[in-house]
DNA sequence: TAATATATTTAAGTTAGCCTAAATTTGTTT
DNA sequence: AAACAAATTTAGGCTAACTTAAATATATTA
């Protein structure tokens, strides 16, 4: 079944906001996330329910259904492969890729994505550390924790960001924080939850709780 | 001014069918080329005329206007750069690129196209030998003639196809005819206008007038 | 539990891009 | 020049994806 660009975007957002199917998503949260009216959301979710991609009960919110999950995985795969291409081959920075990948993900060609994957040597992660589903829609998960939960004196490797918006990524650029770096927690300010960290040994870096809640590490 | 995918496709086709502005294009020829009803064409050309991209007089047909030409050049640039990318980097064959490039050409990002152009080392021609407009919309033209006009005994270099449809390109594949090859006219059958040619020295190749009319060479 | 506030759906209207059928204009014959 | 044929436009309708305003259901709180 072939979806429109708009339907693909809705499916991706419902998958995201439902945490991969773990919770119901309200009409208002979708409207808010997508910047449209609640009426438009109701309109679309009725159609997506009709197509069997989501589960919807009037007034009760929606959840992603199995065919919707498969579709979401396909779109995320395309999105993240294009992000890798843009960064690795076209010298985009990680804060420049979002908008373009948002369009490229809708180009319909299985051959294209298969060849792109080959060309990029089958990457497992996007430039933001998000896992890239394989051709069957499977993703490898690794046990990650958020930096804010790390104890003083502990170290970890920064592997992903939870928020891949340009402002956050630019904030990280400014503080010289990048994926793959070894992070050590030097101090925690219980007053405002801010953290003193070192990045690959460089010290003097203070980050807000909002930032440390959006940085994922492995230990 | 930002156009929709559909508007971009119309502009490209009007530019093409008007021979770059040299002749008027009829409603029916557009309808026929695009596979839509004449009524739909009238609808769209009125809007494109309103936007100043084409010149249109009721019942008289349309022609491309200067801003439309600029837009067409931009779309052709994107289309052909993507075609080069698909063939050179993703190992597509020249008969596989059309459909995908038809979608990729609509991705809106000047940075993307600039970087793609850099990445491909500023190619001048598509895999079909079509010139790639530069960033200002300029194209280099070279004096080309169609193979059917070449005299017996003369040679030339095959540089482009006039028809880049998959069936024609596959026909050329089958006959081992490719761009860059030296073509020599060995014989002409005045009975049916068919031609005996050699390609880089290989003989025993007969081609129809329909084919030799769509092969462009330089001498 | 009843009143009130909030969330959601329905109703009605818009635009892009198509359709078919009818009306109109232009081109071609006689 | 009138009649006919072909090309084109207009009229009316459709679907996708939105909008605002009104109606209705659910949640909260007195
Ligand atoms: Mn998108
Ligand atoms: Mn990302
Ligand atoms: Mn196109
Ligand atoms: Mn081409």
Image (cartoon, coloured by chain):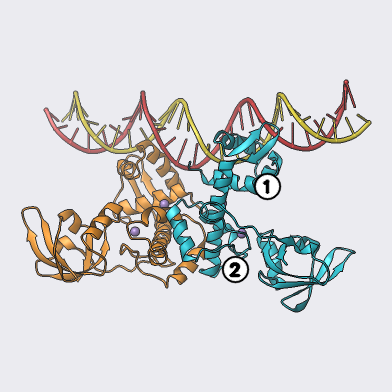
Chain colours: A orange, B cyan, C yellow, D red
Q: In the image, are marks 2 and 1 on the same chain?
A: yes
Q: Is residue B6 above or below residue C4?
A: below
Assign a secondary structure to mark 1.
helix
**Residues packed near mark 1 inside 10 Å, few (<14), some (14 to 19) or many (20 plus):** many
Looking at the image, residue B191 lies above or below residue C11: below
- Whether disc 2's CB lies below 8 Å from ligand 4 is answered no
- Tell me where residue A26 appears, x and y as whole percent: 30, 44
Question: Element under label 2?
Answer: loop
Identify the image quadrant of residue B139: bottom right
Asked which quadrant contains residue B173, the reply is bottom right
* The furthest residue to the left: A191
Where in the figure is residue B125, as x and y percent of width and height? 59, 62
| Chain of the residue that carries numbered disc 1 in the rendered image | B
Residue B54 vs residue A44, the one in the foreground = B54
What residue sits 39% from the left and 67% below the top? A88
Q: Position of residue B63 (x, y in %)?
A: 65, 40
Q: Which residue is mark 1?
A: B17
């Amino acid at each position: 079944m072939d979806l429109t660009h708009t339907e693909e975007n809705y499916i991706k957002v419902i998958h995201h906001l439902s945490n991969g199917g773990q919770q119901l998503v309200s009409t208002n949260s979708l409207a808010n996330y997508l910047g449209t009216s609640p009426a438009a959301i109701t309109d679309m979710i009725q159609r997506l329910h009709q197509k069997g991609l989501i589960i919807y009960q009037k007034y009760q919110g929606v959840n992603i259904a199995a065919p919707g999950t498969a579709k979401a995985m396909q779109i995320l795969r395309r999105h993240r492969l294009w992000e890798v291409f843009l960064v690795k081959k076209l010298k985009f920075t990680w804060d420049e890729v979002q908008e373009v990948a948002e369009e490229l993900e809708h180009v319909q060609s299985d051959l294209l994505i298969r060849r792109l994957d080959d060309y990029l040597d089958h990457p497992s992660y996007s430039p933001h550390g998000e896992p890239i589903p394989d051709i069957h829609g499977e993703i490898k998960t690794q046990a990650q924790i958020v930096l804010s939960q790390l104890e003083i004196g502990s170290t970890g490797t920064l592997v992903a960001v939870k928020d891949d918006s340009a402002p956050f990524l630019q904030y990280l650029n400014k503080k010289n924080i990048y994926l793959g770096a070894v992070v050590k927690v030097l101090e925690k300010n219980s007053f405002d939850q801010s953290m003193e960290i070192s990045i690959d040994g460089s010290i003097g870096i203070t980050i807000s709780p909002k930032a440390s809640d959006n940085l994922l590490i492995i230990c």
